[in-house]
Amino acid sequence: MCAVIVAALVAGSPLLKSGHTTTKTEEVVKIHLTNRYGKILVTPAGYTIYTYNLDTKNHSNCYAFCLHLWPPLVVSNGVQPVGQGVSNLGAITRSGGLRQVTYKGKPLYIFVFDHIPGRISGEGNGWSVVHIP
């Protein structure tokens, strides 16, 4: 990898001269079709993804004990979250520095009691599966 970067610098790559940088991507979601909810977002391993109704656009209101039951879906610094067939993904920085994945600005979470892929036990009480049109 380093040799490629050095070669590009020596060759005077127009991509580097124009100020463009390469962003790493990570597939963090995929679409899953359910009988009850239709198309929803799940992790690549198949775990259901949720939003919290008290969150606002680009801001999480799930802290302290809430995070023990509802861990945020996160990506590393410098990584753009992606999902096949899914647009409107982004990330926010939580207090403490974790980068939480968002869909249409809403922070995303998994539920600790969804012990197996495909299980949807967190719907309700302010939590919703992420529906995809």
Image (tube, helix red, strand yellow):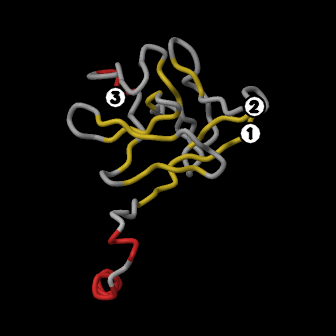
In the picture of the structure, the residue carrying the numbered disc 2 is 38
Up-down relation of residue 80 to residue 33 (above or below): below
Corner quadrant of residue 133: top right
* Label 2, label 1: how far apart the Cα atoms are: 5 Å
Crowd around label 1: few <14 · some 14–19 · many ≥20 (10 Å): some
| Residue on which disc 3 sits | 68
In the image, 121 versus 23, the foreground residue is 23
120 and 74: which is toward the camera: 74
Mark 2 vs 1: CB contact within 8 A: yes
Mark 2 element type: strand
Categorize mark 2 by other alpha carbons within 10 Å: few (<14), some (14-19), many (20+). Answer: few
Disc 3 and disc 1: Cα gap in Å? Answer: 28 Å
Label 2 and label 3: CA atoms lie apart by 28 Å
Q: Give the residue furthest to the left.
A: 96
Q: Nearer the viewer, mark 3 or mark 1?
A: 1
Q: Nearer the viewer, residue 6 or 85?
A: 6
- The residue lying at 33 percent from left, 51 percent from top is 76
Three-letter code, disc 1: Leu
Which three-letter amino acid code belongs to the residue tagged 2?
A: Gly
Q: Which amino acid does label 3 sit on?
A: His
Q: Where is residue 84 in the image (x, y as percent from the top left)?
A: 63, 52
Q: Mark 1 points at which residue?
A: 33
